[in-house]
Image: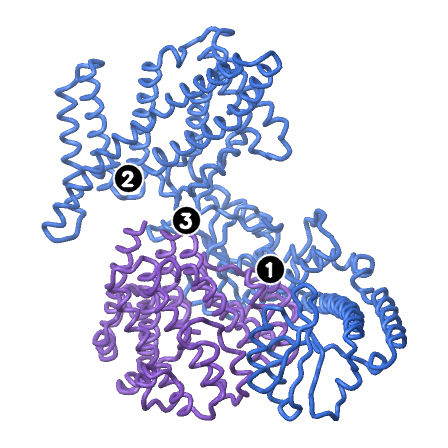
Chain colours: A purple, B blue
Amino acid sequence: MSAYLDTRVSLYAGRLWPDDALTALIEAPEGTVAERLIGHGLPQLATGYDRASGAQDPRSLEQRIIAQILDETRVLVRPQSGAARAFLTFWTARFEMSNVKTMLRSKMTNERPAAILARLIPMGTFGRLDNQDLAHAEDIGELLRRLEAGPYAGIVRRARRAFEQSRDPFSLDAALDRGYYEGLVQRAQPLEEAVGAPFRSLMANLIDRINLVWLLRYRFNYGLPPAEVYYLLVASHYNLSGARLRDLAAQDSLEAVLAALPAAWQARLAGATDVPDVFARMEHVAAEQALRVLRSRAPGIARAFAYLILRERDLRAVRAVLRGRHLGLPDDDIRLALRRAPAELN
Amino acid sequence: MLRAEPLLRIQLLVLASEAQDAALALARFGVFNPAPCRETALAESPAAAYREAWLEAEARLSKLQEECGDTGPLNLPADAEAPSLADLQELNHWLKEVWKDCLDCHGNEARIEDARSHLGTLEDTLAKLEGLNVNLAYLLRPDSLLSASIGSLPGAELKRVTEALSMTGYLVSRFDQAGEQVFAVIAGPRSRRNEVRGLLAQAGWRELPVPDELRTHPQAARAWLEAERMRLNMQTGAACQVRDGLREQFGPRLHEARLRLALARPLAEAAQAGILGRGGLAALSGWIPRRQLDELRETLDARLHGRYWLDPRELTAGDAAEVPSLVRYPGWLKPFVPLVKSYGVPRYGEFDPALPFAVTYLLLFGAMFGDIGHGAAILLLALAFARRLGQMVWIGVAAGAVSMLFGFFYGSVFGYEDIVSPRWLSPLHDPIRVLTIAVTFGVSFIVFTLLVNVRNKWAAGRGGEALFDSSGLAGLAFYLGAVGVLASLAGVADVAQTAWILAGLGIAGVAAFKWHETRAGLGERMLVTFIETLETAINLFSNTLSFMRVAAFSLNHVALALAVFTLAHGLGMVGHGVTLVLGNIVIIVLEGGIVAIQALRLMYYEGFSRFFSGDGREFVPLRIEKA
């Protein structure tokens, strides 16, 4: 199975988008976009550009991108078992978390079930929630109770408690995000022990980046006090330890936070002036590391995870390009958006 | 042979205000499979709001049904009409109100339960704090420089909260635990109280209200707690009259709601497939059996009195992938159909394998598990569990009967070979003959599947594949030729020369077809052609050998029985009897199960995979009751 997985990942790696291919997509004539997308294994995104087939896809671009990611993840999950399978399956659960957030927000605004259902991401075989049933919950209280009886009970219970105390939608989102990533860290631990450095480096880049970006956002965009900011971060054992995060959360400005980072990080983030810039630079570093793991002889699960990280980054960039083209933005603006792609797909 | 019924695609144009009655009439008609409407000129979705209201109402009703338990059969009058959109929305609104009352009751109950649990905790806390000799009145003073509070939080959060609070000079002291909740005192500078408020809310911190009574004399505190407990008990009794009296209060109206929602179901279900419309008209599309077109007209006339336009259309090539397959199976064959459909649904016009499946499956099972006693046991067990097995009981009965029949052929009764003399052959004494028969059966079966595949491909308009592919006529010629060559070499027949020519022509045809079909460079094309042609030969050879397992299992059955007898002979009288009984149970359960799976495996992989793509659509008629 490992030979199969290695071969499959290597074949998939050929679908990644080098920077020049993205640049070419920005400048490509309308008639050649579909061909370029299909060439990089994105037939689901080509619908609408492929005038010859005349096919229409009722799903949004976002939904199609996630469907593409789920399709590829399904292929990579198939030959896995045990901890590796559990990890990759849970990796897809963040889309379901996004569905949970959508439903919770919609219930707060008394949206109708049909409208809610139309906005949810189709999870296919990875779906563990009964969306029909949940969307028909009468109010947020019933929805939370139903969610607590489901597969994400632990994460939702924490969010419900936070929400009950504060009645603040932010509490729900923050608790769900934190609960999800702590679950991911937990599922990664047996793999870090079995696979070692390549896998751990990918997780470290992911969780450290999330923690730093959240820290900056909560502290300086939302103005939360340091203790609360620290509490909302993901508990982890990577480069930014608990003590370091407490120290960073206590700083008074973005510059002071960057200055308090380890030396290697300071070099990477020198000159960064805002949170999206910090995110983009850290994502670039994470992508380089993922590429190193992908091209190495690391175990299959590490290479598969590296591929998925890179693929998702690519798809965000492709989305930015397609949206930019759709809106008729100048090429330079689209290029700028590529450097500032948002952190989460949802 | 079983064939899918010839279907017609119909488009029914009705007034949008009568769409629900038209859909109800189609559901009563019983053989209308809705399909998406393709009329591009119709841009509206006149039934979308109806479906939305129905889904909401149905969800609420099913939740209410869980509370009041109204799940009996529905008696729908033949002349009952489907509710209009306005009726449905009104019904939905009423169900919403009832369910909200019910939810309030649940909420109240949960709150009372919560309060009761907290009261108990408070009592324990009081006992602990008394033991600690802490002056609560002093500790919780609102004008002190120290801000302290007593409360609980999830145990998993304690470490994180302690670390976070330490950033603001606060301390956490845990003093008790109940379940996953940890009870603690949090204390720190009052000036920084605002900084920790948000954090505590995020962490799910629940402050224990410590009333003044608790801060004074323990006896007064106990009296206060007792009074609170009594108050909560009284609240519990009166908490939920709506829910408790749901059946009595709303029973008849809820039953009426159930009835009306059942009548509304057809339009809601048809709307899922896609109903389009424009300017007060609605178009329902779908499939019906061609021979029932006149019957449909009569049904519609009776309900809509001519206020409709029915447009029946013949199938076109573009419909091929969408047409559902409607096959009417005789009653005795129906139990086998789920086993066929667990592999896949035959496409419209494709050969339906249910009948050969049933016959061959039973033959294979009987051949591998031929024993009068064991067969009788399976038959009786199936009858004993008839209620649980449903219609699957007939598979058990038939398998038991065929097993008994082969038991007569083999002369085997519970493994004893000397009670009944074999009417045909004894696997143990004539294994080579058994192997030869099994392989011969395999050859016949594979030839049959190849012929079916040729027929399917031809019917689907894929003549090239029917004639030249590895599972087509060329593959069949190669296979028959190869079998002829092997038979000649074994001295069974003398057709070597003809067989060589037939096999050569066949494999050459397959290779030429593969070459023609491969779109690649010269080298890759040669490689693909070579490998796929070779694969054709290997597959057919290995598939044939696969049938040797039929002989192997028939021998295995005898061998297992011999093993049981050998064990039993070494024991005393009681041990002998117990071993025989247990051994036979093991044979029936273990070997019977394995043989049942092996027979299914042979059907699926050596049979179905050759001619049956299984990606057809099942004919799912519109119905009033939930499927």
Chain ID at mark 2: B
Q: Is residue A37 left or right of residue B166?
A: left
Q: Does dot 1 land on a helix, a strand or a loop? A: helix
Discs 1, 3: same chain: yes
Q: Is residue B290 above or below residue B444?
A: below
Residue under pointer 2: B458
Residue under pointer 1: B20
Mark linked to residue B323 = 3
Residue at position x 47%, y 44% in the image:
B289
Discs 3, 2: same chain: yes
Q: Are the residues flagged by discs 1 and 3 in contact, CB closer than 8 Å?
A: no
Whole-angstrom CA distance, mark 3 to mark 2, is 18 Å
Q: Nearer the viewer, mark 2 or mark 1?
A: 2
Name the amino acid type tagged 1. Answer: Gln
Q: Position of residue B22 (x, y in %)?
A: 58, 56
Q: Is residue B464 above or below residue B143?
A: above
Name the amino acid type tagged 2. Answer: Trp
N-term mark: 1 or 3? 1
- Hey, which quadrant is residue B229 in on the image? bottom right
Q: Is residue B52 left or right of residue B327?
A: right
Chain ID at mark 3: B
N-term mark: 2 or 1? 1
